[in-house]
Amino acid sequence: MDDVIELAAFGTTFEAQTAAAHLATEGIVTSVVTDDAGGAIPSMTFLEGGVRLLVNASDIARASELLKDWEADPVSDSADNDVQV
């Protein structure tokens, strides 16, 4: 990845990884970052501001639009996501 920036923050690693998988199907490279003591202390995620989804700076506009469309899809489970874009 070249310059990376935060696209969104999620409440859980699962939600962030699901969004990352969706963006990957569209050819966007992502990285999911969290500090939860290797999964041993999941509540640490909230202290760190959530699970962060990072993308290349050059992909931010397209990734943001894809993520918003994905969240708005009523058929998708993402309608219940706690996403902060």
Image: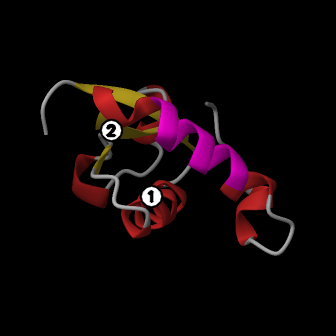
Residue 55's disc is 2
Q: Secondary structure at mark 2?
A: strand
Tell me which amino acid carries mark 2: Val
| Left or right: residue 66 compared with residue 51 | right
| Left or right: residue 32 compared with residue 74 | left
Res. 10 image quadrant = top right
Read off the residue under disc 1: 23
Residue at the image point whose x is 80% and y is 53% from the top = 72
Residue at the image point whose x is 34% and y is 37% from the top = 54
Residue at the image point whose x is 42% and y is 70% from the top = 25
Image coords of residue 68 (percent x, y): 68, 44
Tell me which amino acid carries mark 1: Leu
Q: Quadrant of the N terminus?
A: top left
- Cα separation, mark 2 vs mark 1, equals 10 Å
**Residue 82 visible:** no
Q: Please name the predominant secondary structure of the magenta segment in the image.
A: helix
- For the magenta stretch, what is the residue range? 61-69
Give the camera-side residue of 26 and 9: 26
Q: Quadrant of the C terminus?
A: top right
Membership of 55 in magenta stretch: no
Give the camera-side residue of 47 and 72: 72
